[in-house]
Amino acid sequence: MNAAVTESPIQLHRPAKPVAPAAGPWTREAVLALMEKPFMELVQQAHAVHREHWPDGDIELASLLSVKTGGCPEDCGYCPQSVHYDTGVDASKLMAPDAVLEAARAAQQAGATRFCMGAAWRSPNDRDVEKVAELVRGVRGLGLQTCATLGMLSPSQAGTLAEAGLDYYNHNLDSAPDFYPTIIGTRQYQDRLDTLKNVRDAGIHVCCGGIVGMGETRDQRAGLVAELANLNPPPESVPVNDLVRVEGTPLAEGLKESAPLDPFEVVRVIAAARITMPGSRVRLSAGRRELGDGIQALCFMAGANSIFYGDKLLVTGNPDAEGDRALLQRLDLKTTGQVVAAKG
Ligand code: SAM
Ligand code: DTB
Ligand code: SF4
């Protein structure tokens, strides 16, 4: 793939243009007004913001590894890893450091610059956090940016991970506050905001986004974007997931008779995120296999500048790395990292 490296692997968040403090909070109505614009006008506006703040136009490649899979006590209605649903995902223990480092090395050689470790916990205990801290030290030692997503964290747990060199913590708001209780009963919206504060206070960069395609309205999608944009400061990374319908989860069952969300809506959400959070990396996350190349290209046009890269997300599939490299090359898009020894 292209040899251009626009960011050294461990260099953290640097939009080209320093982002001025937000003029004021984004109302849900203002975000909805953006999303209701004629499609081409919206994409054009988002693209202009994108070019201004990210003139290099590079795409960040972040790889994911599920370091502790399944058996989660939470009841998130979209999630194949919840113990409440029969999805065929077996619960496993936390992976050994050697195996995690091997996966991280492979991701790096394939061109990833960030390595995100996910665990299906409601909230880790302190011993778990110590073990993950050891993983973070190892992965960072390879020269990769580190990210973890482990559920709710206390201030001291966030401090432990910060000390170990954790660069980013992923914890999503998932949806607008008024839609949220219809998909999750075991954790409140405020719990999520509390964890985000603990992470921020510990000095870790925040990765926070949500899911679309769960049966929410456009107004509720605008509500999610407004919540994210009004975090102060906004998250450095904003993952936008398009629901992967996994058989056995309540959302997949409940939406069986409904068509998937119009993919142009995903583009609108990306555009709204780009306009309201100009300095954030907006990551086109779960659901890319279903979106296809053309929609992904539109998402990049509208300001997405990060993807999950690698054949697997946590337990579901992702476009294969070779196909992604080919797609980015066809679109003349540079990446943040360089392929050293790609598989396949
Ligand atoms: N257990 C931790 C937590 O919930 O914070 C971390 C892992 S959890 C799987 C991370 C995020 O993945 C969720 O917040 C959700 O936004 C996203 N996600 C999970 N299942 C998904 C699905 N089926 N489709 C799209 N996104 C999904
Ligand atoms: C995020 O927002 N999306 C990723 C990551 N953060 C951890 C997870 C997507 C999971 C998709 C379904 C699965 O494979 O479990
Ligand atoms: Fe557990 Fe996270 Fe899945 Fe919710 S999204 S069930 S907290 S693994």
Image (cartoon, helix red, strand yellow):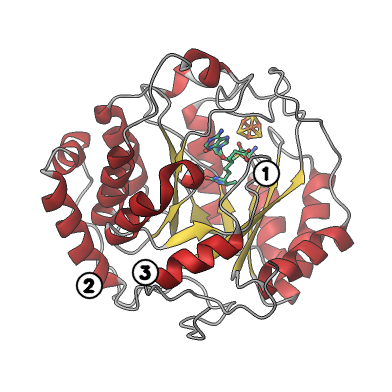
Q: Of the residues under marks 3 and 1, which one precedes in the sequence?
A: 1
Q: Is ligand 1 less than 8 Å from the beta carbon at label 1?
A: yes
Instruction: Find disc 1 in the rendering and name its residue.
Output: 150
**Residue 73 location, x and y as percent?**
72, 24
According to the image, label 2 marks what residue? Answer: 52
Q: Is mark 3 within 8 Å of ligand 2?
A: no
Percent x, y for residue 262? 31, 33
Tell us which disc is closer to us: 2 or 1.
2
Measure the C-alpha gap from mark 2 to mark 3: 19 Å
Question: Residue 220: where, in percent of width, then height?
Answer: 30, 28
Q: Residue at position x 68%, y 32% from top?
A: 122
Q: Position of residue 97 (x, y in %)?
A: 86, 59
Seen in the picture, residue 318 relative to 163 is either above or below; the reply is: above
Please tell me which residue lies in front, 193 or 82: 82
Q: Is residue 226 visible?
A: no
Judging from the image, what secondary structure is the residue with disc 1 in? loop
Spatial separation of the CA atoms under disc 2 and disc 1: 34 Å
- Please, what secondary structure does the residue beneath circle 3 have? loop
Q: Which mark is residue 31?
A: none
Would you say the residues marked 2 and 1 are in contact, meaning their CB atoms lie under 8 Å apart? no
C-alpha distance separating marks 3 and 1: 34 Å
Please indicate whether residue 151 sits to the left or right of residue 99 in the image: left
Q: Which one is earlier in the sequence, the residue at label 2 or at label 3?
A: 2
Determine whether 153 is above or below 324 in the image: above
| Residue drawn at the location 42% of the way across and 48% of the way down | 292
Q: Look at mark 3 in the image and give the residue it sits on.
A: 331
Local packing at callout 2 (Cα closer than 10 Å; few below 14, some 14-19, many 20+) is: some
